[in-house]
Image (cartoon, coloured by chain):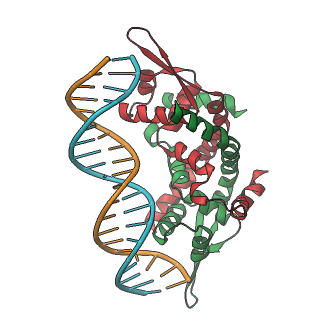
Chain colours: A green, B red, C orange, D cyan
Amino acid sequence: MRDVAAPDRLQVWKEEGQDLGNCPVRHVLDHLAAKWTTLILLELAQGPARFNAIGRALPDISKRMLTQSLRDLERDGLIAREVFPTKPPSVEYRLTDMGLSLLGPLGVLIDWAELHAAPIAAARRAYAAG
Amino acid sequence: MRDVAAPDRLQVWKEEGQDLGNCPVRHVLDHLAAKWTTLILLELAQGPARFNAIGRALPDISKRMLTQSLRDLERDGLIAREVFPTKPPSVEYRLTDMGLSLLGPLGVLIDWAELHAAPIAAARRAYAAG
DNA sequence: CTGAATCCGGATCGATACTG
DNA sequence: CAGTATCGATCCGGATTCAG
């Protein structure tokens, strides 16, 4: 059970003298929070896709953010970018093995989020009211 | 296996006409990414704590951010705030049941992050070099 | 088609000083 | 002890425009 292990994690880190403001976990969480990277990962989980195909799948993303998010993910080795020298050129993005392995933990979190979406919304309303 | 379910999630959402830019999952991920909330949750996982105690455990957090992060978590019902009318006053924060239930999924993600921290760092260096 | 470059408004964050 | 108020710097994200 991770419910038992998790509480000790922070203590272990502190004993190891980890920089809590800059630990490896933070980098991962930052990515997940980047507003689009998670959706891109989920989209690519359905198979490789090209730039505009991803853009179409995520209606409200701008080209700027799509480019930036893809670069971030590529930089961390979660997705791979392959250019086909066709005319006009096409670029395909796909999950790497590491990116694929993130889908599991991510799914767990998504399950939690969906399960608790209603209680959270309720707590928010209660907080606003009181 | 969630590795199988996750890829379909996005497709399901789209079929349901979900607003991908504003889905419940996003709210949760935003919190985890808020740079401090995760650390606060881990700290409180070790037991209830008072304002300054949390602050001391997280060396580089400012009072401003600590207050704000605690408010956010309280607002969403992940932590509870109890004021003791002592003199001087003391305020204790503790995880709610819902907050406690988040530690599991969070731990899974942390495990992944720790396991892949080295490969990610390597990918980053390789990207910077190439 | 696939991006890069630029500009800009708003949100965010940290430090400081102050209150009950 | 437990915050609040305010200011300034920085960052982020969106729209637009340009290029290969």
- Residue B108 visible, this orientation: no
Quarter holding the N terminus of chain A is top right
The quarter holding residue A44 reads bottom right
In-image side of A125 versus A20 (left or right):
right
Q: How many marks?
A: 0
Q: Residue at x 49, y 69 (%)?
A: A62
Q: Residue at x 49, y 42 (%)?
A: A23
> In the depicted view, which residue is nearer to us: B125 or A75?
A75
Residue A129, percent from left and from top: 53, 33
The quarter holding residue A38 reads bottom right
In-image side of B12 versus A66 (left or right):
right
Residue B28, percent from left and from top: 58, 45
> In the depicted view, which residue is nearer to us: B12 or B4?
B12
Residue A25, percent from left and from top: 54, 44
Taking the view exactly as shown, the residue that stands out farthest to the right is: B1
Residue B98, percent from left and from top: 65, 32
